[in-house]
Every structure is written in structure tokens, then in C-alpha cells.
Image (spheres, rainbow, N blue to C red):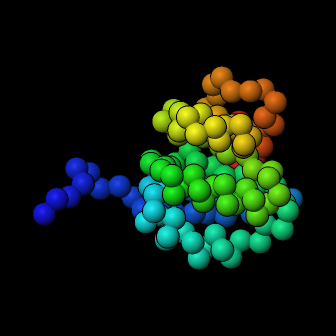
Amino acid sequence: MIGTPFAEPPACMRDLRVPGLVALRLSGVVDARGVQALRPDLDALELGGRRLVVDLSEVSFLDCDGLTMLVDLDGRCAGSTTLVVGSRAILRLLDLTGLDRAFRIRRRGGGARPSSTPPLLQSASGQLA
């Protein structure tokens, strides 16, 4: 039997309940299986043209199924999605696919990203709310 060399946590989602926007924090592996597990919660989201912030800083793996999920969510909220990214690998994936130009990108923990991205969901300590 062939297994994975290490166990990865499955994808999970938390709705952060921020007034005026929909804020989600994803974690774990966001691949075909992860997106399938998230699907009921994603389908239940009422985006209604509101701004969307998706925190990916706790995502350990993101593939094309995860990217498709993000594009679908962006379409449901009238194209006003900000991604909070903490991983260089995910930043690279967004860059290679050109999706870094389709979303507003905010890099968690600082770093060089376009300064036009607004500081969303930050508390006085600079951490995400």
C-alpha cells in the first residue's frame, strides 16, 4: 500500500464574522478532497456582492482545485476578493497562474507586495482579527 510520507490536516474553514464583509480563514490541505469537504459550507455562504477576505496563511497546500474554488468565490462576490497569504509557495502559485493580478493580495507577516492593498482585518497589534 502506498501512503503519503506525512499526514496533512484536512481543509477546514472558519467564518470570522466581520461587519461589512465576509471573512474566511482556511487551513490545512486545499486540494480536490479539501474543496469537496468545504463545498457545503462554501455553498451556504451568502456573499451577495459583499467584499470577501480569504485568509490562506494556515493553508499547508493549495492546488488547482483550491485555485478554482477561490475564483468561483470571487465571481460570487462581484470580484472584490482579498487573499491573505503567508506562504511563499502559495504566492508563487498565484504568480505563475496570473491570479496575483486577479485578486488583491496581502502578505501576512509583512513583505514586499503592492502597497495599494488595504490593511484589512488588522487589529491594533497588527495581527489578523
Q: Residue at x 58, y 39 (%)?
A: 97
- How far across and down, in percent of the image, does residue 15 sit? 67, 64
Q: Nearer the viewer, residue 82 or 96?
A: 96
Which quadrant of the view contains residue 7? bottom left
Residue 99 is situated, as x and y percent measured from the top left of the image, at 65, 41
Residue 34 vs 98, above or below: the answer is below
**Which image quadrant: the N terminus?**
bottom left
Name the quadrant containing residue 102. top right
Left or right: 59, with 112 as reference point:
left
Q: In this rendering, would 92 be left or right of 73?
A: left
Residue drawn at x 45%, y 47% is: 60
| x and y percentages locating residue 83 in the rendered image | 67, 45
> In the rendering, at what x and y percent does residue 52 appear?
76, 55
Residue 6 showing in the rendered view: yes
Query: As drawn, which residue projects farthest toward the left?
Result: 1
Q: Residue at x 54, y 55 (%)?
A: 66
